[in-house]
Image (cartoon, rainbow, N blue to C red):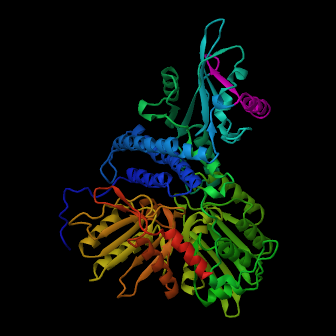
Amino acid sequence: MAEDTATDAPRLLNRELSWIQFNFRVLALAEDPALPLLERTKFAAICARNLDEFFQIRVGGLQEQVDAGVTTPSADGRTPFQQLAEIRTRVLEFLERLEEVFEKDLLPELAQQDIRILTWGELSASAQGELSAHFGEQVFPALTPLSVDTAHPFPYISNLSLNLALVVSDPDSGQRRFARVKIPSMFPRFMAVPSGGWIAIEEVVAAHLDLLFPGMDLDEPALFRLTLDGNLNVETTEGDDLLLEIESGLHRRLRMNDAVRLEVEARMPEELRHWLVEELKLDAEDVYLCRSMLDLGALWELHGLDRPDLKDGPWAAVTPARISSAVVERPDSSFFADGSFFAAVREADVLVHHPYDSFHTSVEAFLAHAAADPHVLAIKTTVYRTSGPLSSMARALTRAAQSGKEVVALIELQARFDEGPNIEWARSLEQMGVHVVYGLVGLKTHGKVTMVVRSEPGGIRRYCHIATGNYNPATAKVYEDLGMFTAANDIGTDAGELFNYLTGASRPKAFRHLLVAPGSLRSGILERIRGEAQQRDGRIVMKLNSLSDPEVIEALYEASQRGVEIDLLVRGICCLIPGVPGRSERIRVRSVVGRFLEHSRIYRFGSPARPRTYYIGSADMMPRNLDRRVEVLAPVRDAGLQARLDEILERNLDPQARSWTLLADGTWRHSRGSFHTQEHFQDLARKRA
């Protein structure tokens, strides 16, 4: 092995700072004048919402460590306190750019398209009158003015709620009080102005505060928003009821978690700001001054306007040719099930590439066929993020259970921010006769696997679907993901043992072909990386969401030093540093960010001169995925499917593709190539159909 001569170069990039860089790449889409206006507006909203989640989870976790006195540095050498300081610096830079694109680009261009966001003072008297009448009838009854004095303690501030703060004075006694009015979240953020345009609801509420505090003198109000630590700390033992523990944890998160960020309008008086900081027990570093509209995530509402001229053209997903003749939909949206779907999969494995290939006529059709087919004995599936108890998946599982089939749904109650919906779905399925399992204590079940057991003339056969994305028809329209249908006996046997492990009390067996975490996935990936390092023509390509595991990164460094050519397609976090002489000069890292969220994971080992091995599945190369989650990677062995995976990888790696490249100094360079990979795959899907 070549000696690592890059002794002074850092070995890892910081995970949190790498995520912020990803959000900068999303922000570049909002800044791109070549994109339709409402798509740019949508990406600005995505940036803001991404940042909300980042503060709730990542910043919240770091602050917990600081509060607990943790000084142990992260893998890149930074203590929690140092990370928080650097995060603030980068977030301030990010917010400056986000507010600039909103104020200088999006707002004026929206106004040119008759989508004007107005203030109360810009409205005509007649428009103010009509909005005042609407306010009095619909909004005013839902508002609750809260003042703070010896008899009224500081109120609870709910997570990410919009609030008006002001000082209220009694004209007789001169007594001054702080007051807060919460903007109810059940109302849309933007109200239609009768004469045209839109106005933020807080503008309307602020114009009518005299109705909430009659007879009082009111100072100028200012908007604020609080972010709470979103981590759900659930401590369970083998004897605990996981469902009850999750519900209890949800209550604690809603009511008791610490504040981690305070956003205030820059015009808020110092007196009000100081009062909020004191009452919420925050530091000055936790306060972020907003010089634009607070909570730009609300711009999603504008993207929902009926203005197709300002959006991407609609995409109509296609049915993969291999199963198209087997998928016949009735007028009532059910599928005609005659066993032909299973015959198609029995003939050869089928790969689906969402959102280019339809989720409805592939995955949902698979479940519907299984539910209706009298030869199907059992259906077993894992669920991480759902679309609720009324989804087609829920209906199929319910129909199957009611027809006497054995139906098992492993629902992960700890899917972050989806705990509540998953609990609701689990209880609904249980009431319909589905066997519901709540996952394993100490592990999140993140793998995406469905198995159908069918009785056939030759005996029992298992049909499996193994995917990179969630069983959610809504996200399947905007997430780029892969799924494979297979009737291979060895994969089916592994899948059967996986479900026995997940639903029973047995210890996991050694899987023959699936790579499963925790267990064989980490060692399997490392073995294949090191195997390529032993080849003269070593070659590795990985497409994934995040790469932060130090052991995997070190193995890739070592492979690079041994001459292996490595290409990494990393959408989000990447802690590996490519292009460092003497360490990683044979490693290249690219990132594709576009209309659809790149979400599939593909792992390819081998050169064109040797047989290659391919895996797809749910796992990113992160410590949590490899050690603290149940993850599944499945081999893809069909030559035609391997060619499809090659096409996905090679088109994303094409030097002419629009993408971002990670440089050795840790910065990302934007390459405005001649084509966009996602548009290319839309064209390919049309041709395949």
The x, y position of residue 653, in whole percent, is: 40, 72
**Residue found at the very far front of the displayed protein:** 112
Magenta span dominant secondary structure? helix
Is residue 431 shown left or right of residue 304? right
Indicate whether 343 appears above or below 471: below
Can residue 212 be seen from the camera position used here?
A: yes
Q: Which residues are magenta?
A: 124-152
Can residue 555 be seen from the camera position used here?
A: no
Is residue 133 shown left or right of residue 39? right
Observer-nearest residue: 261 or 223? 223
**Residue found at the very far right of the displayed protein:** 332
Which residue is drawn at the image coordinates 66% and 67% (left, top)? 409
Indicate whether 154 appears above or below 568: above
The x, y position of residue 352, in whole percent, is: 58, 76
Residue 133, quarter of the rendered image: top right
Indicate whether 252 appears above or below 403: above
Observer-nearest residue: 243 or 295? 295
The x, y position of residue 583, in whole percent, is: 24, 66
**Residue found at the very far top of the displayed protein:** 172
Which quadrant would the N terminus be assigned to in this image? bottom left
The x, y position of residue 590, in whole percent, is: 39, 65
Residue 13, quarter of the rendered image: bottom left
Which quadrant would the C terminus be assigned to in this image? bottom right
Which residue is drawn at the image coordinates 54% and 85% (left, top)? 490
Indicate whether 499 appears above or below 172: below
Asked if residue 125 is among those painted magenta in the image, a careful observer would answer: yes
Is residue 550 shown left or right of residue 517? left
Observer-nearest residue: 440 or 468? 468
Asked if residue 523 is among those painted magenta in the image, a careful observer would answer: no
